[in-house]
């Protein structure tokens, strides 16, 4: 047993190692990093103060990271199809291979957003200012959570949906739902419920949307609670800052774990 | 070496394998032939465990294939389309496969040498030509001295010299006691290589036996004509 689990761990490690080597040499990952470097540095210089810059950066992260991760994740899985079959023909467990492929894709993206966002913050000494530590930490946390979650969703969709365009459409559709259509749904729910107990349905809606959860997490740790939006305000009133962070983080962890587990299961049962 | 019993596989409404019984003799080269869509690739993928049959068993040296993946250390697979991560080099691909397989089996770099791949192995694969990729693809399949070689259209995209080099290697490995299953649309290649023929059409095995049996049964003295005759009979029936 011990030996078997060690070989599995080594499978995951070597798949990750070569996947990371492939991705860090790719141009689009460099472009992705550069985008955040420019956005972060630009906002710090011309964004009217560090607090404001951090907020704008948060909005950019919540908009761009899920979209880019979902699209690239889906495309990546399809482009690696033949390669995946070659790997499946080796003495490896499917679960280990899926873990290796997923982490090998997600880790370089995490690295890219962290470097892109944090390097200008460190360089401009915003990082260590006592007033900003929590805001910076939650910004990076949100960027990582979006990468992990939308990477997992992209892998799940691309594993389950055979047709490349349909999978891409599904991934983009889910992103549209979570980032744009969602606000409309919140509005409709609020209007329909009117004066009735609006709190719990809105809480449920927040938990149902990873992007909104990340937004709540960001706002709980920034000094501009007014920008928190309706669901964010409900969330912080219901939980308070400390418990709210824990609740949001737990929900985000579930949002990562569930698509990863479903994707691994679909991958294990799939016919290639 | 490999035996399938009553292998069935459907993809939705489409039956891809229907009660397929095939036996690959140890130390023999079996040609898997048949029209497009006959189920050849599905059969190969079933043996590899990439596709799970709906029913039937596959025996590897008499042991049914189950969830244990370790038997694949004894298989070398050359897929039809070599597509590798573009920014990795051939040398990295090789190192990765060695990592995944462990070093239980001796390395065999004969094809890397025969194809003179050493300079190409240091370049990112996206910069390599289709022919060079196919050579790397072939060399990787043979690189870990497998007992069973599964070759899907191995000579596609190779120039005549490389194609001959690869065929020599396949014959040398048979002489070393390895078992080979190969699909190809190039009948002259199979004529040179094959000991046995399995003919699949419409998801069923229409013929399985030695090349000599096939030629006798169809009264043809060339493999290409014998297979054509089988296809004609299939259509007439």
Image (cartoon, coloured by chain):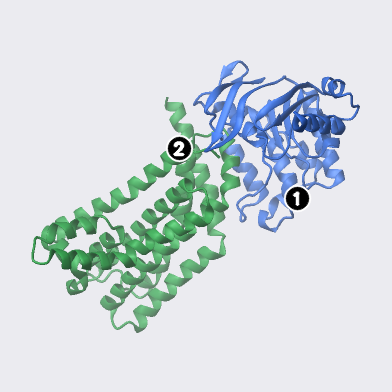
- Host chain of mark 1: B
The spot of residue B37 in percent (x, y) is 67, 39
For residue A60, above or below residue B107: below
Q: Which residue is mark 2?
A: A95
- Of A68 and B52, which appears nearest the observer? B52
Identity of the residue drawn at 21% across and 70% down: A229
Q: Please give left or right for residue A127 compared with residue A234 in the image.
A: right
Q: Please give left or right for residue B91 compared with residue A271 in the image.
A: right
- Of B220 and A144, which appears nearest the observer? B220
Q: Which mark is residue A238?
A: none
- Host chain of mark 2: A
The spot of residue A243 in percent (x, y) is 15, 55
Which quarter of the image is occupied by the N terminus of chain B? Answer: top right
Q: Is residue A265 visible?
A: yes
Which quarter of the image is occupied by the C terminus of chain B? Answer: top right
Mark 2 and mark 1 in contact? Answer it, CB < 8 Å: no
The spot of residue B199 in percent (x, y) is 74, 28
- Of A46 and A102, which appears nearest the observer? A102
Please tell me the colour of chain B.
Answer: blue
Callout 1: 10 Å neighbours few (<14), some, many (20+)?
Answer: many
Please tell me the colour of chain A.
Answer: green
Q: Please give left or right for residue A163 compared with residue A203 in the image.
A: right
Callout 2: 10 Å neighbours few (<14), some, many (20+)?
Answer: some
Q: Which residue is mark 1?
A: B132
């Amino acid at each position: 047993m011990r030996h078997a689990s060690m070989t599995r761990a080594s499978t995951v490690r070597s798949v990750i190692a070569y996947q990371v080597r492939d991705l860090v040499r790719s141009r689009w990952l460099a472009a992705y990093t550069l985008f955040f470097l420019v956005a972060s540095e630009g906002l710090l210089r011309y964004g009217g103060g560090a607090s404001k810059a951090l907020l704008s950066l948060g909005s950019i992260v919540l908009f761009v990271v899920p979209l880019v991760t979902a699209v690239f994740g889906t495309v990546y899985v399809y482009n690696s199809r033949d390669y995946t079959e070659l790997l499946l023909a080796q003495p490896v467990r499917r679960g280990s291979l899926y873990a290796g492929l997923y982490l090998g894709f997600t880790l370089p993206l995490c690295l890219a957003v962290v470097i892109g966002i944090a390097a200008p913050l460190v360089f401009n000494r915003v990082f260590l200012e006592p007033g900003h530590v929590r805001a910076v930490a939650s910004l990076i946390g949100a960027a990582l959570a979006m990468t992990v979650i939308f990477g997992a969703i992209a892998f799940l969709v691309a594993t389950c949906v055979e047709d490349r365009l349909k999978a891409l459409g599904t991934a983009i559709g889910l992103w549209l739902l979570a980032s744009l259509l969602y606000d409309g749904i919140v509005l409709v729910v609020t209007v329909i419920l009117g004066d009735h107990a609006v709190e719990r349905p809105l809480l449920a809606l927040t938990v149902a949307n990873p992007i909104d959860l990340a937004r709540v997490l960001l706002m709980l740790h920034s000094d501009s609670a007014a920008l928190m939006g309706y669901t964010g305000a409900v969330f912080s009133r219901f939980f308070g800052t400390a418990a709210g962070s824990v609740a949001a983080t737990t929900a985000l962890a579930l949002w990562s774990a569930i698509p990863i587990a479903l994707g691994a299961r679909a991958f294990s049962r799939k016919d290639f | 070496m490999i035996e399938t019993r009553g292998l069935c596989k459907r993809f939705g409404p489409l039956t891809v394998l229907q009660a397929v019984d095939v036996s690959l003799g140890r130390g023999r080269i079996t040609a898997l032939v048949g029209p497009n869509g006959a189920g050849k690739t599905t059969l190969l993928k079933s043996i590899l465990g990439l596709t799970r049959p709906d029913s039937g068993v596959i025996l590897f040296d008499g042991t049914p294939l189950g969830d244990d993946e370790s038997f694949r250390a004894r298989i070398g697979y050359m897929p039809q389309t070599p597509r590798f991560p573009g920014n990795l080099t051939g040398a990295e691909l090789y190192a990765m496969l060695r990592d995944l397989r462990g070093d239980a089996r001796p390395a065999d770099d004969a094809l890397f040498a025969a194809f003179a791949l050493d300079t190409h192995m240091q370049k990112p694969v996206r910069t390599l030509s289709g022919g060079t990729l196919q050579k790397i693809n072939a060399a990787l399949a043979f690189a870990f001295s497998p007992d069973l070689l599964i070759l899907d259209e191995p000579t596609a995209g190779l120039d005549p010299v490389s194609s001959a080099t690869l065929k020599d290697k396949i014959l040398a490995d048979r002489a070393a006691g390895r078992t080979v299953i190969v699909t190809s649309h190039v009948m002259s290649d199979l004529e040179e290589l094959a000991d046995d023929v399995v003919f699949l059409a419409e998801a069923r095995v229409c013929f399985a036996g030695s090349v000599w049996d096939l030629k006798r049964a169809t009264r043809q003295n060339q493999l290409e004509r014998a297979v054509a005759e089988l296809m004609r009979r299939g259509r007439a029936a």
